[in-house]
Image: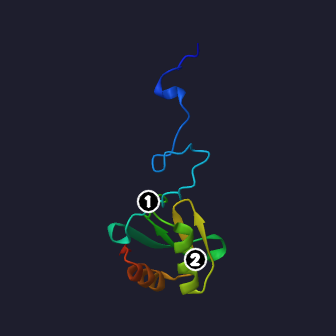
Amino acid sequence: MRLFEGTPFDRPPRCEKCDQLEEECVCPPEPPLRIPPEQQTARLSIEKRKKGKRVTVVRGLPEEGNDLPELLKQLKDRCGAGGALKGDELEIQGEQLDRVRETLKEIGFKVKG
């Protein structure tokens, strides 16, 4: 006799929506949780890097609940500059404070800095 034989743990897992086995389920995955921009505050700053290069840094936006790579792409396109995503920080090359602030406000974020 197996340890969990006859208990709910003995049965294979089933989909909660269609009641099919999880391996056979064709339900679309649930969309990821998104936090509305109006409920978030982005903090902007300008930092100095090697050889005197300056970058605009956006902090305060959590990785979960946001599509940071897409937001970075929008900011880079709007500023016409390169950039990088480092953890939960967005970096845009150059002093782009005004453009980044304007873009984030258009999207709906609260902005400080």
Quadrant where the C terminus lies?
A: bottom left
Residue 100 or residue 37, whichever sits in front: 37
Q: Which residue is mark 2?
A: 73
In the rendered structure, which amino acid carries the disc numbered 2? Lys
Distance from the alpha carbon under mark 2 to that under mark 1: 20 Å
Q: Position of residue 14 (x, y in %)?
A: 52, 41
Q: Position of residue 65 (x, y in %)?
A: 44, 61
Return the disc, 2 or 1, that comes first in the chain's sequence: 1
Q: Is residue 21 above or below residue 107?
A: above
Dot 2: what SS?
helix
Which residue is at a point 58% across and 80% down the rendered structure image?
A: 76
Residue 95 or residue 27, whichever sits in front: 27
Q: Position of residue 7 (x, y in %)?
A: 47, 23
Mark 1 packing: few (<14 Cα in 10 Å), some, or many (20+)?
few
Q: Is residue 104 above or below residue 32?
A: below
Quadrant where the N terminus lies?
A: top right
Residue 12 or residue 72, whichever sits in front: 12
Mark 2 packing: few (<14 Cα in 10 Å), some, or many (20+)?
some
Specify the farthest residue to the right: 51
Foreground tag (2 vs 1): 1
In the rendered structure, which amino acid carries the disc numbered 1? Leu
Which residue is at a point 53% across and 82% down the rendered structure image?
A: 95
Q: Is residue 49 above or below residue 102?
A: above
Residue 42 or residue 35, whichever sits in front: 35
Q: Which residue is mark 1?
A: 33
Quadrant of the rendered image containing residue 60: bottom left
Which residue is at a point 38% across and 80% down the rendered structure image?
A: 105
Dot 1: what SS?
loop
Specify the farthest residue to the top: 1
| Total numbered labels | 2
Q: Is residue 20 left or right of residue 104?
A: right
Q: Position of residue 37 (x, y in %)?
A: 38, 71
